[in-house]
Image (cartoon, rainbow, N blue to C red):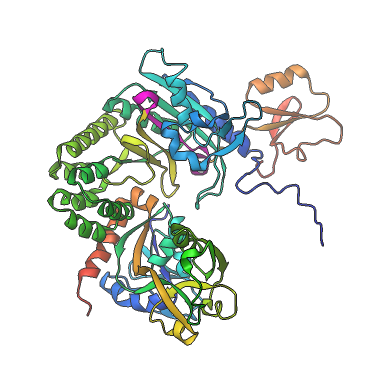
């Protein structure tokens, strides 16, 4: 039997150490995003990492129950959950401790979340998450504000030209309810819509009769918002679905009024990945193929209060943002005057003081050194 | 970023069947793309904005899920096994018809009643499909994950059953197995990456449309 000691560097699957300069960069990102939220009147809350399972997984939290790490509280003997999403915690705070604060309530949060499993795209089980919740307002203006605040937060960290995909997760269920389809047909239609399998949707819709005739045109309507809205306007929809379509048009108009150049796509019958949303749902994509930067939408917070929120993923944003050079690192040789060092820090230098005669600028990864009281750039590759 | 769209095609059986469909969709890849001994993996096509890559069938789904390829063609069996939220499967191409089936030895002990099983050992390259299928009827599937020659498993005592892709059934028969249940019929699907469809709806939508029209066109 061998007994190799495990390598101490090995972490559990999906966990990573963030090193310089990435750790610094992530923290700076999170603060820049939070500052951008704050400028729009969103006030920061800081829920705990752990709370009782029954409150954490109530309401909208149920959607992430299977992604939640749990542990037993030895004190209360009750089961606790480690948050896999911060949104339900903010909704809880709004409904309880901040219940008496006049609405609409604008809250923001930043923190780490833990997930039982990574996704196929990313194995990470610990993720930074930042976001806003706008609680107690039920209007297109509220939905638009949240979307635009998120877009501005991306811009604050240098991510320009995102595209916003809007889905209407209640549209397909509403059409299916209206057509009173059988559970089996409903299941098949849901699956076909989920895959965007046009032939299967058409075939199943034909079985459902005239009430489902509108489904196929709506499936094909997905795409740039103006075209999709035109298709929605032309479609013959039952009253409930018409109301959803009108709301989508109002939200998109309100977004474009606030962010005229924003690229918006609309997918009327998609519901993939949005399990508890009751109105428009948002997915923000970075430029090019950089992928998803955040997700959100309208939902019912605890106590049935209307709310809209969005979560952004700083890890994805870090990959998408152009990398900016860090501040210059200035080496302070032994005996550098304290006041000079303070002045240089005030000028924006990061100073690295020599502690012994062996220290030198290159070994300590400095970009500049002090020559006769003046910073001089070192001829070497950037740190 | 590059505007080139990558189409991932599966090596092997399906590739030969695809030729006609690709031609009708107006895709003419470099001549050597069907040659299995060609060392190239990425092939230009007559369209300067479309390149073809040739990978293993399971890898088509991986390439498309990660957005390394924006569109791809793979069997419904691969999609059932992967079930990835990043993949849409908008078109059933109707080619590569076969089925995912359960097979067992033709000499099974008649006294054994599958309804009483708590668990069953299954040799397969589809662990998720097998696990899900048996779990739905209250049976744990103990998976023996093989990449080929599943048909040997029952006779050599590796597993009680196999879950495998069956086209004609002749391989099963030649190895003393009988097909006892079809889990799902399989055809090839056109798949697309979710982010690509959302962020480049015009370009990706146009390719889906070209395949749709090609499917409706009569085969020459």
Q: For residue A314: magenta? A: yes
Q: In this figure, what is the number of numbered marks?
A: 0
Q: Is residue A205 above or below residue A357?
A: below
Front residue of A45/A249: it is A45
Whether residue A321 is visible here, answered yes or no, is no
Question: In x, y percent, where is residue A326?
Answer: 61, 35
**A373 or A342: nearer the viewer:** A342
Compared with residue A19, is residue A340 higher up or lower down, i.e. above or below?
above
- Image quarter for residue A62? top left
Q: Nearer the viewer, residue A106 or A61?
A: A61
Q: Residue furthest right?
A: A357
In the rendered image, residue B196, in percent from the top left (x then y), is placed at 37, 52
Which residue sits furthest bottom? Answer: B174
The structure residue drawn at horizontal position 78% and vertical position 20%, both measured from the top left corner, is A337
Image quarter of the C terminus of chain B: bottom left
Position in image of residue A75 (x %, y %):
65, 26
Residue A267 colored in magenta in the image: no
Residue shown at the point (17%, 37%) measured from the top left: A242
What's drawn in magenta, residue-wise? A301-321
Residue drawn at x 52%, y 76% as measured from the top left? B150
Q: Can residue A251 be seen in the rendering of this structure?
A: yes
Q: Position of residue A59 (x, y in %)?
A: 41, 32
């Amino acid at each position: 039997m061998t007994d190799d000691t495990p390598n101490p560097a090995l972490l559990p699957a999906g966990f990573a150490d963030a090193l310089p300069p990435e750790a610094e960069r992530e923290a700076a990102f999170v603060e820049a995003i939070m500052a951008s939220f704050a400028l729009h009147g969103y006030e920061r809350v800081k829920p705990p990492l752990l709370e009782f399972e029954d409150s954490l997984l109530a309401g909208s939290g149920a959607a992430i129950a299977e992604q939640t790490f749990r542990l037993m509280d030895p004190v209360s003997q009750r089961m606790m959950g480690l948050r896999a999403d911060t949104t339900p915690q903010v909704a809880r705070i709004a409904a309880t401790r901040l219940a008496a604060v006049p609405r609409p309530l604008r809250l923001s949060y930043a923190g780490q979340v833990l997930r039982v499993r990574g996704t196929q795209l990313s194995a990470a089980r610990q993720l930074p998450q930042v976001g806003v919740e706008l609680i107690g307002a039920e209007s297109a203006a509220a939905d638009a504000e949240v979307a635009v605040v998120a877009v501005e937060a991306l811009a604050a960290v240098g991510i320009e030209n995102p595209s916003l995909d809007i889905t209407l997760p209640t549209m397909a269920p509403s059409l299916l309810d209206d057509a009173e389809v059988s559970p089996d047909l409903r299941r098949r239609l849901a699956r076909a819509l989920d895959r965007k399998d046009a032939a299967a949707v058409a075939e199943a819709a034909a079985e459902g009769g005239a009430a489902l005739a509108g489904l196929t045109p709506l499936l094909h309507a997905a795409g740039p918002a103006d075209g999709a809205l035109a298709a929605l306007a032309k479609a013959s929809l039952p009253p409930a679905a018409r109301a959803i379509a009108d709301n989508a048009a109002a939200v998109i108009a309100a977004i474009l009024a606030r962010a005229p150049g924003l690229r918006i796509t609309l997918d009327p019958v998609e519901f993939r990945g949005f399990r508890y949303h009751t109105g428009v749902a948002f997915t923000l994509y970075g430029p090019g193929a950089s992928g998803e930067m955040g997700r959100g939408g309208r939902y019912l917070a605890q106590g049935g209060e209307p709310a809209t929120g969005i979560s952004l993923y700083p890890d994805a944003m870090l990959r998408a943002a152009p990398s900016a050079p860090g501040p210059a690192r200035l080496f302070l040789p032994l005996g550098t005057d304290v006041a000079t060092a303070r002045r240089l820090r005030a000028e924006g230098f990061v100073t690295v003081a020599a502690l012994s005669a062996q220290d030198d600028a290159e070994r300590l990864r400095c970009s500049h050194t002090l020559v006769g009281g003046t910073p001089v750039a070192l001829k070497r590759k950037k740190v | 970023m590059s505007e080139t769209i990558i189409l991932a095609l599966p090596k092997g059986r399906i590739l030969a069947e695809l030729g006609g469909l690709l031609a009708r969709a107006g895709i003419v890849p470099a001549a050597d793309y069907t040659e299995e001994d060609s060392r190239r993996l990425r092939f230009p096509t007559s369209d300067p904005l479309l390149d073809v890559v040739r990978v293993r069938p399971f890898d088509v789904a991986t390439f498309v899920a990660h957005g390394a390829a924006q569109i791809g063609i793979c069997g419904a069996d691969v999609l059932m096994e992967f079930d990835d939220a990043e993949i849409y499967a908008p078109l059933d191409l109707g080619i590569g018809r076969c089925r995912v089936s359960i097979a067992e030895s033709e000499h099974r002990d008649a006294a054994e009643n599958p309804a009483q099983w708590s668990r069953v050992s299954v040799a397969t390259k589809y662990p998720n499909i097998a696990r899900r299928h048996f779990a739905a009827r209250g049976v744990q599937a103990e998976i023996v994950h093989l990449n080929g020659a599943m048909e040997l498993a029952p006779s050599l005592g590796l597993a009680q059953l196999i879950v495998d892709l069956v086209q004609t059934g002749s391989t099963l028969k030649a190895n003393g197995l009988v097909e006892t249940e079809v889990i799902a019929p399989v055809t090839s699907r056109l798949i697309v990456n979710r982010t690509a469809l959302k962020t480049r709806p015009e370009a990706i939508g146009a390719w889906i449309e070209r395949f749709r029209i090609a499917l409706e066109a009569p085969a020459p």
